[in-house]
Image (spheres, rainbow, N blue to C red):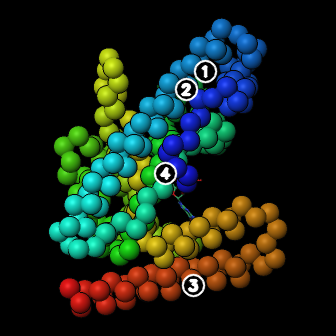
Amino acid sequence: MQGSGKKINTEKDDGKIRALIARAMGEEDESAAVIEMLRDFRWNMTLYHCAIREVQTKFEVLDEELSISRARNPIDRIESRVKSPESIAGKLRRNNLGFSIKSMRENLNDIAGIRIICQYIDDIYTVANMLCKQDDITVVKIKDYIKDPKPNGYRSYHMVVEVPVFFSEQKHFVRVEVQFRTIAMDFWASLEHDIKYKKEIPDPELLAADLKECADIAYSLDVRMQSLRDKIL
Ligand code: 0O2
């Protein structure tokens, strides 16, 4: 995930997006329908960027407040990204869905993504619950891969929320996927993610078993660090 400051609605990116749209619509690059959808696509991407800012600010505020009341910051760092047009089109294709604005708004929960990296497991549940309680936030879905890790060892707490974004004329509700991880879980997931995209892996089964063991070691470190910290509070 990268900083949400990255703007995608530049002339340079337009060519790629226009080509994607034209292919999906079976139209010429320059056709009026393609230009119209391009405008709509850019407008929606702006909405997702703004939704990220709204949610990110909420976490920054919580972190600052908790740093005063608890004398430490529960959030180590925040990362965010808006999914690239290619990834959006790819995910829709894999799910046998057409590439349209309606389809992506309705079917994809992770176009806007935020990752909250915390020091301790407890901090994850603390800040996640604090976000849920805010009255402008609607929780759409929760997947707790900390309590129920994936078979490969992946642990994270995933939450899809809907947040209002106020534009000049109207309020728009936008979905944002928030992934909460400890530093150790994030360390593991980054390596696992990089390996997943490597084409040639010498002994994939051994590597998968090694990775699973590392995930369990990382989790046991998280639990022990948490318990040490609890002793000094
Ligand atoms: P990227 O490049 O990180 O964006 P849903 O969105 O609920 O309809 P989905 O997409 O299966 O269904 O959601 P899920 O299970 O909540 O996982 C979504 C994201 O979690 C992934 O996004 C990853 O970021 C992360 N994730 C899930 N499982 C793993 C895993 O085994 N290893 C790692 N490293 N990350 C994982 P994307 O779109 O796959 O990728």
- Going from N to C along the chain, the mark reached first, 1 or 3, is 1
Q: In which quarter of the image is the C terminus?
A: bottom left
Q: What residue type is labelled 3?
A: Glu
Q: Which amino acid does label 4 sit on?
A: Ser
SS at mark 1? Answer: helix
- Disc 2: which residue: 42
- Going from N to C along the chain, the mark reached first, 3 or 4, is 4
Q: Distance between the residues labelled 2 and 4?
A: 18 Å
Front position among marks 1 and 3? 1
Q: Residue 76, how many percent across, how many down?
A: 40, 68
Let me know if residue 145 appears in the view: no
Front position among marks 3 and 4? 4
Mark 3 vs 2: CB contact within 8 A? no
Q: Which amino acid does label 2 sit on?
A: Arg
Q: Tell me the residue at 46%/73% (across/down).
A: 183
Q: Residue 129, how many percent across, how many down?
A: 24, 59
Q: Which amino acid does label 1 sit on?
A: Leu
Tag of residue 213: 3
Q: Is residue 97 left or right of residue 175?
A: right
Tell me if the residue at label 4 has its CB under 8 Å from ligand 1: no
- Disc 1: which residue: 38
